[in-house]
């Protein structure tokens, strides 16, 4: 089989893996080697599905002894199988890297024979790249659950980031769909990695040249929409993973039906992309905006509102905390205003030191007034001319793509000289903030 | 007090040249109406003064900025010179004068001019430079790796350190077609020079097969059920496509679509057109 055929098969079976980030490590080039790593990460291209391509994302092999129901590479699936030799893969990585096609390698694998054997193959490839080809670019490698801890440790010394897939958001789902895996078998290597990473940090303080262990930390991913787990459960799980295992990222993957299975959504079901999007938005709120999972969802409202993003949703349920005086509000509260992000909040802090800010200034600082206007005051005033009507507020907070799903706005009334204006007609009514909230939260 | 404000400065378009203009603005007590690069053809209606670049004067201004206004401000000035803002020189002059007059805290007034426009222009340059750290595509031509780019801003000085660090052992060249300049790197040294014409040596024999593998990888990695042309375009605007080998088939598909549309405008179907082409060929 030609390398290009192998590449096709092994890319095709790796594409459902979500993570393609190359971030978290700053490493400049060592003379005599090829490559470096940039901590903000670099996207080299974007595929037709709009996802970033930064790493050569392939499997070592798509041969697998496991039979996970949701996976294209399950052993009972009748598909073409292939395997790279370590040298073929190392050569391909180097040649792609030299041409600046990629930032490095993302290597995962089906399970050949057993987890230890598979991990040894991964080690062999990375060792070839790092030692013989003197490759200094980014490497993300999957830790295979069930592999011996000392093998994982060796792998971690060769890679920049490691990940163990949590696969599904609950133990029940795992039991049903991935009978060969268990919560323990997944959390065990995750715990091992966490300890090695923490240990390594103190080693490096003590000995300057201690070999680095996965300096980009570890991440994980889970499939969303294949099982009945709620957003609340998923977000709580992520929060726990960030806290307990110090993960750098949790990735969510909208389940794309690839196989017929009685326990899975049918083949013609579209991947729940909006749900995935909402989870990422909430994930950002956990990591950069100081939110907790329990603030965003609860047992009574266990799923995100498809119409409004999680931050808007939180804000309209907490109108008692608004409006906020932009010129005085603390940073943590500014971050909670819809339409103000991390960058614009930082700019506000800097700019208001030099003078009072008005709405025009806010716009220049990058604040999205369309959303923020309902929640802020500048010098004690709301935006001039702002008419808060439930319809306009709702439209402003709902993302553009969801607008078409809203009922049509009431047609503008034609004014005529001859009509008697009834003092109670809609034209004279000003709607209170309360009305907006009621409308948005569905109490109206 | 400023004596004159109705003069246009002409300069050579370089960073040192601009700093010399700043020096002369103080020395001659002139706040110019505009500062134009000598290659531009505007401004001939006004009195013009050509400012000869002088390294010593530029160095004095640079030291002044560094000590009085800080490294960050110097970075803004340096990068400001590389942006494609049509009046970057005047913005920079006003920025520097404001800093010297009111102290560096004046730069916190982010929503006011010239900070707002200048910061936006610099941000735009840095964003484009960051995109190009990903979108540069080398092809192997014998011993040398060669890439071509068409940036709006002058990104070469911003990306030079990144690429010379990453490919420290390689000989490579990045040609900026827009500004007719090239970054030329040999192991452990690089220069950025003007390039009027560039004739490329022929590609290495295995180049085509690696490009084909990259194109295959690109096509295979996309999940069909999630195709999202708008998302792709937001992250990777069309102006970059021309020089990305993986976008070749998308470009061809688009060209074909435009062709079909233009035929439909003429009221012919592509099939008829094909037949017509055949007939013409037969007649010949």
Image (cartoon, rainbow, N blue to C red):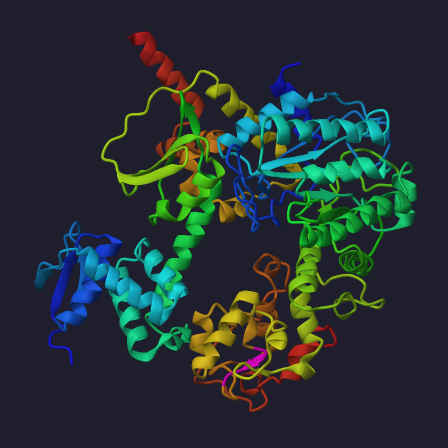
Residue occupying the far bottom of the picture: A423
Q: How many marks?
A: 0
- Between B144 and A316, the one lying in front of the other is B144
| Left or right: where B67 falls relative to A241 | left
Magenta stretch bounds: A374-378
Percent from the top left, x then y, of residue A306? 70, 60
Residue occupying the far front of the picture: A207
- Between B68 and A373, the one lying in front of the other is B68
For the C terminus of chain B, the quadrant is top left
At x 71% / y 75%, what residue is drawn? A317
For the N terminus of chain B, the quadrant is bottom left
At x 58% / y 40%, what residue is drawn? A53
Against A91, residue A208 (above or below) is: below
At x 69% / y 27%, what residue is drawn? A125
Percent from the top left, x then y, of residue B44? 9, 58
* The image quarter in which residue A129 lies: top right
| Left or right: where A410 falls relative to A417 | right
Q: Is residue A415 visible?
A: no
* The image quarter in which residue A269 lies: top right
- Between B9 and A9, the one lying in front of the other is B9
Q: Is residue A400 visible?
A: yes
At x 40% / y 77%, what residue is drawn? B105
Against A425, residue B255 (above or below) is: above
- Between B61 and A89, the one lying in front of the other is B61
| Left or right: where B110 falls relative to B2 | right
| Left or right: where B199 falls relative to B133 | left
- Helix, strand or loop: magenta stretch: loop
Magenta stretch containing residue A39, yes or no? no
Percent from the top left, x then y, of residue A209? 65, 45
Percent from the top left, x then y, of residue B26? 18, 71
Against A391, residue A121 (above or below) is: above
């Amino acid at each position: 089989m030609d390398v290009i055929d192998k590449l096709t098969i092994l890319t095709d079976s790796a594409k459902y893996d979500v993570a393609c980030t190359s971030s978290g490590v700053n490493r400049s080039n060592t003379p005599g080697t090829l490559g470096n790593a940039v901590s903000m990460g670099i996207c080299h291209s974007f595929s037709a599905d709009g996802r970033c391509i930064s790493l050569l994302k392939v499997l070592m092999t798509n041969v697998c002894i496991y039979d996970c129901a949701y996976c294209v590479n399950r052993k009972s699936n009748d598909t073409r199988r292939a395997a790279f030799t370590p040298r073929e893969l190392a050569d391909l990585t180097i040649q792609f890297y030299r041409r600046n096609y990629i930032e490095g390698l993302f290597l995962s694998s089906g399970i050949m024979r057993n987890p230890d054997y598979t991990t040894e193959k991964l080690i062999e490839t990375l060792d070839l790249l790092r030692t013989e080809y003197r490759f200094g670019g980014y490497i993300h490698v999957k830790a295979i659950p069930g592999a011996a801890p000392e093998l994982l440790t060796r792998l971690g010394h060769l890679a920049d980031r490691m990940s163990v897939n949590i696969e599904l958001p609950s133990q029940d789902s795992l039991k049903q769909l991935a009978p060969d895996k268990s919560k323990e078998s997944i959390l065990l290597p995750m715990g091992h990695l966490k300890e090695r990473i923490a240990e390594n940090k103190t080693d490096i303080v003590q000995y300057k040249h201690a070999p680095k262990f996965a300096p980009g930390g570890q991440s994980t991913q889970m499939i969303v929409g294949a099982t009945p787990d709620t957003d609340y459960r998923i977000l709580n799980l992520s929060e726990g993973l960030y806290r307990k295992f110090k993960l750098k990222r949790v990735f969510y993957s909208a389940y794309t039906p690839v196989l017929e299975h009685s326990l899975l959504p049918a083949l013609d079901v579209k991947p729940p992309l909006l749900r995935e999007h909402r989870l990422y938005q909430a994930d950002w709120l956990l990591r950069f905006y100081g939110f907790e999972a329990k603030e965003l969802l609860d047992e009574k409202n266990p799923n995100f509102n498809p119409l409004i993003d999680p931050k808007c949703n939180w804000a309209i349920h907490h109108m008692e905390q608004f409006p906020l005086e932009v010129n005085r509000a603390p940073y943590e509260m500014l971050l909670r205003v819809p339409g103000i992000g991390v960058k614009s909040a930082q700019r506000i802090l800097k700019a208001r030191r030099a003078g009072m800010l008005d709405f025009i200034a806010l716009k220049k600082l990058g604040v999205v007034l369309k959303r923020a206007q309902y929640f802020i005051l500048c010098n004690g005033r709301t935006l001039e001319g702002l008419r808060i009507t439930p319809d306009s507020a709702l439209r402003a907070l709902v993302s553009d793509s969801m607008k078409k799903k809203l009922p049509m706005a009431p047609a503008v009334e034609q004014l005529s000289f001859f009509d008697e204006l009834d003092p109670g007609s809609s034209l004279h009514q000003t709607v209170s903030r309360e009305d907006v909230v009621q409308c948005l939260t569905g109490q109206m | 007090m400023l004596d004159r404000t109705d003069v246009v400065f002409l300069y050579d378009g370089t960073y040192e040249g601009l700093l010399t203009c700043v020096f002369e603005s103080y020395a001659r007590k002139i706040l110019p109406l505009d500062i134009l690069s000598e290659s531009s053809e505007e401004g001939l209606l006004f009195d013009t003064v050509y400012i000869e670049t002088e390294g010593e004067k530029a160095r004095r201004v640079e030291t002044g900025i560094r000590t009085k206004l800080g490294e960050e401000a110097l970075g803004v000035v340096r990068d400001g010179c590389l942006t494609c803002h049509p009046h970057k020189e005047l913005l920079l002059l006003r920025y520097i004068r404001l800093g010297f007059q009111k102290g560096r805290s004046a730069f916190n007034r982010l929503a006011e001019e010239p900070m707002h426009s200048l910061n936006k222009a610099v941000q735009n340059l840095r964003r484009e430079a960051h995109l190009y750290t990903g979108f540069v595509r080398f092809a192997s031509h014998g011993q040398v790796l060669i890439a071509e780019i068409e940036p709006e801003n002058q990104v070469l000085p911003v990306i030079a350190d990144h690429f010379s660090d990453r490919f420290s052992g390689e000989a490579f060249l990045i040609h900026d077609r827009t500004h007719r300049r090239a970054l030329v790197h040999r192991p452990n040294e690089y220069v950025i020079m003007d390039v009027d014409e560039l004739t490329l040596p022929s590609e290495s024999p295995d180049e085509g097969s690696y490009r084909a593998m990259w194109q295959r990888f690109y096509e295979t990695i996309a999940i069909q059920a999630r195709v999202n042309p708008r998302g792709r375009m937001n992250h990777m605007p069309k102006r970059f496509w021309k020089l990305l080998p993986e976008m070749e088939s998308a470009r061809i598909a688009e060209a074909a679509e435009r062709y079909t549309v233009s035929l439909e405008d003429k009221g012919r179907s592509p099939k008829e057109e094909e037949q017509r082409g055949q007939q013409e060929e037969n007649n010949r």
